[in-house]
Image (cartoon, coloured by chain):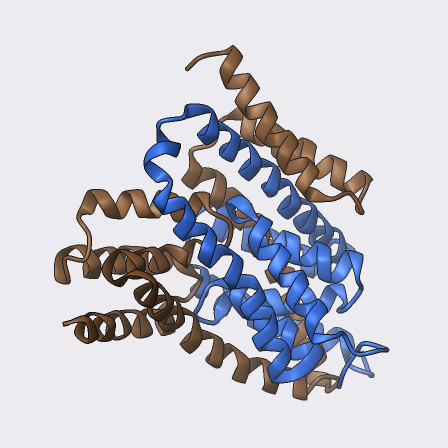
Amino acid sequence: MRENVLWSLIVVFVPFSLVSIGGGPSIFAGIQHQSVEVYHWVTAREFIDLFAIARAAPGPGSMLVTLLGWKVAGWTGAVVATLALFIPSSLLCYGVTKVWNHYRGRHWHTALERGLAPIGAGLILAGVFAIFRIAGAGILSWAIAGIAAAILAWRPMLNPLILLAGGAAAFAVWHGLIPY
Amino acid sequence: MNPARTPVSLLSLFLVFFRVGLFSFGGGLSGWIYREVVTLRGWISDEDFFSGLALSQILPGANVTNLSVYIGQRLRGPLGSICALLGLVIGPFFAVIALVTAYAQLSATPWIQDAMSGAAAAAIGLLLVVAAKGAYTASRRLVPFLILTATFVMVGLLQWPLVLVVLGLAPISVAFAWWQASPDA
């Protein structure tokens, strides 16, 4: 029974690992379908809670699968689910990266690198936007992000933990003074 | 192959990514990686970082895990990738499990949720700095600047599928860079 559960974690998450183009958000709907409706690992309500926890915790949002594994089979489940999601895509990425770095210095490589750089920067900008949209952030979040960015631009060596603590304090105090 | 003057030690690679993994609330991970690897340590160049970031986003898998594999490979080969990836994931692995076991108590305490939203917002500030840096680098030439703007508008505002947008824009952008870098251009 236990081996079966671990096996189904692998069977479900390995394919998701290889199709998660654009990162975690692209596979959350599929993971929800499999773990709630197909395998009944968690209820729909529990899934939403786990999703929120994975977002609040540090690290990539796809640590959601760690929590699913944990719910299903404790520590072993957590390890198996995490490895199943991260190893296949990382191996693929390693292969591509190795080829990519091997041809460093060639004319076409330089062109690819310079050509991809503005797209990478544009994607970061879009990512900032998407995070705020998902979080349903208000004006205060934007203000904190803007101030944090300004401080970092001014003092690049400042430890960001200070900014995180400042942001946390500002938010808690603000909402303490002005109730919802 | 190895761009660093003295090779980066596997331990420091692990530790840098461990710190990034553990303290990156709210999705500012690539911003934090940029700061640690490019701004503070100069392990790789700006262009290296941003092109690696674009690769990481096109390939399947979480962007930050791919970016860690990329940077690890660039600096120290296969062991570098393993150290960076392990460092990145191991802290959050225990953090999410700790959080899920404490969840019932935490969700009953409103100010903790506010504090976490605030920390997440500040983390976005890290990303904004990286975006500004990329925009500044790109805006020295017209075509890269237009490509950056188009990427942002299509993916960020119009919410078109990321992979299709990248596959559509990359050939134009690369063709321009090819022409720019040609000796006879």
A93 relative to A16 in the view: left or right? right
Location of residue B153 in the rendering, given as x and y in whole percent from the top left corner: 52, 48
In the rendered image, what is the letter of the chain coloured brown?
Answer: A
User: Hey, which quadrant is residue A145 in on the image?
Assistant: top right
A56 relative to A76 in the view: left or right? right
User: Hey, which quadrant is residue A163 in on the image?
Assistant: top right
- Of residues A53 and A141, the one nearer the viewer is A53
Name the residue located 75 percent from the left edge and 51 percent from the top edge.
B136
Location of residue B141 in the rendering, given as x and y in whole percent from the top left corner: 76, 59
Quadrant of the image containing the N terminus of chain A:
bottom left
Q: In this picture, is B97 found above or below B73?
A: above
Residue A60: in sight, yes or no? no
Name the residue located 82 percent from the left edge and 83 percent from the top edge.
B184
Q: In this picture, is B110 found above or below B136?
A: above
In the rendered image, what is the letter of the chain coloured blue?
Answer: B
A149 relative to A64 in the view: left or right? right
- Of residues B170 and A102, the one nearer the viewer is A102
Q: In this picture, is B69 found above or below B25?
A: below
Name the residue located 50 percent from the left edge and 33 percent from the top edge.
B117
Quadrant of the image containing the C terminus of chain A:
top left
Residue B109: in sight, yes or no? yes
- Of residues B83 and A147, the one nearer the viewer is B83
Location of residue B8 in the rendering, given as x and y in whole percent from the top left corner: 76, 74
Location of residue A59 in the rendering, given as x and y in whole percent from the top left corner: 50, 54
How many numbered marks are there?
Answer: 0
